[in-house]
Image: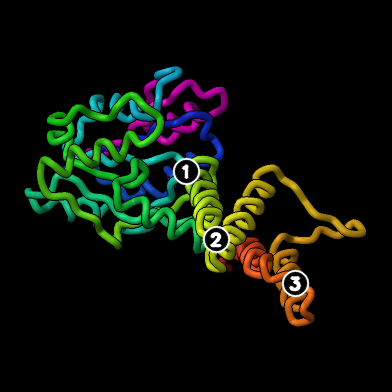
Amino acid sequence: MRLSVVIPTLNEEEHLPACLESLIPQLELGDEVIVVDGGSIDRTVEIASSYGCRVYVLEGSSIGAARDYGVRMASGDIILSTDADVVFPEGYVVRLKGAFSDPSVVAVTGPVYDLKGRLGYTALGAGASLFGLGCNMAFRREAYLSTSGYPDASYAEDVALWRELSSLGRTVYDLKLSVYMDISSPYWNLPLKILSSGAMLLGGQYWGDLGKAIAGMGAGMLASQLASEMGLRLEVGGIHIHHSVLGFLMFLSTVVADALGKLPDEYRFLAYGLSLGVLGHHAITEPTD
């Protein structure tokens, strides 16, 4: 059983070495790594070549087109689709090949965990991987050629393929076939912002106390995320105040104001929700160690 690993890249000199160093020692004779580059202006192509990868340059190509080209250029009968910022744990390739020892299996995937151990991002990655993610998906090349292939797109191209593969035979979700990556990228942060905005809208439509609390939490989480992405910092006397400290102070002041009867009833649950949203953002996005 020969494995071909396909990695689309674009200016990945920072991440690619760690990916290849975690992967290549696990490969066997006859396996290969194919890098399809979209026109990097950094050292990505040079780095890939130095690790012995087969490199193709498709300048301006979408992720879907790059993945598709790599599969069609591959010589292996099993294709592993991944990304340049993925890190593979020891024993990954052995377990992956073992999953295909069953001839009825056409495709295999597993969870994607946050490299920095942040609870919220880990939950997001593990949940999204149920639908088949291109950073941790393997399939039989023969099965792939029976589908319409990856669409020429840079979003959800992996989910579209997984849906087609699922119609051809057995697909497997292996909880122990996990990979790691830094999930706090603009691509991954989009769902977090959508969920926060949705909470605000849901709370706005439900005018009970629960709705106000939900709206407040959504607002607190969204504001924290946007502030983080824009690099906004709160400083008092030259000292940086982390947003988790701000959230705690907001919650404490809300409790005190409520206890003193200074918090209007119509704002009580909104205020509690807002402070909990700021604290919640810290809890799900900060490293656990």
Residue 112 within the segment the image draws in magenta: no
- Residue plotted at (37% across, 32% down): 53
Q: Nearer the viewer, residue 149 or 208?
A: 208
Discs 3, 2 touching: Cβ within 8 Å = no
Dot 2 falls on a residue whose secondary structure is loop
Mark seen at residue 207: 2
Which x, y percent locates residue 78? Answer: 19, 40
Q: Disc 3 marks which amino acid?
A: Leu
Q: Which residue is mark 1?
A: 85
Q: Disc 1 marks which amino acid?
A: Asp
Please determine whether, in this image, residue 42 is positioned above or below residue 170: above
Q: Say whether residue 286 is visible.
A: no
Which x, y percent locates residue 26? Answer: 32, 50
Mark seen at residue 263: 3
201 relative to 174 in the view: left or right: right
Dot 3 falls on a residue whose secondary structure is loop
Q: Callout 1: few (<14), some (14-19), or many (20+) C-alpha neighbours within 10 Å?
A: many
First in residue order: circle 1 vs circle 2? 1
Q: Specify the quadrant that holds the C terminus.
A: bottom right
Dot 1 falls on a residue whose secondary structure is loop
Please determine whether, in this image, residue 176 is positioned above or below residue 131: below
Which x, y percent locates residue 4? Answer: 26, 37
Q: Which residues are magenta?
A: 30-57
Between tags 1 and 2, which lies in front? 2
Q: Disc 2 marks which amino acid?
A: Trp
- Residue plotted at (24% across, 52% down): 96
First in residue order: circle 3 vs circle 2? 2
Q: Nearer the viewer, residue 104 or 7?
A: 104
> Farthest residue in the left direction?
103
Residue 32 within the segment the image draws in magenta: yes
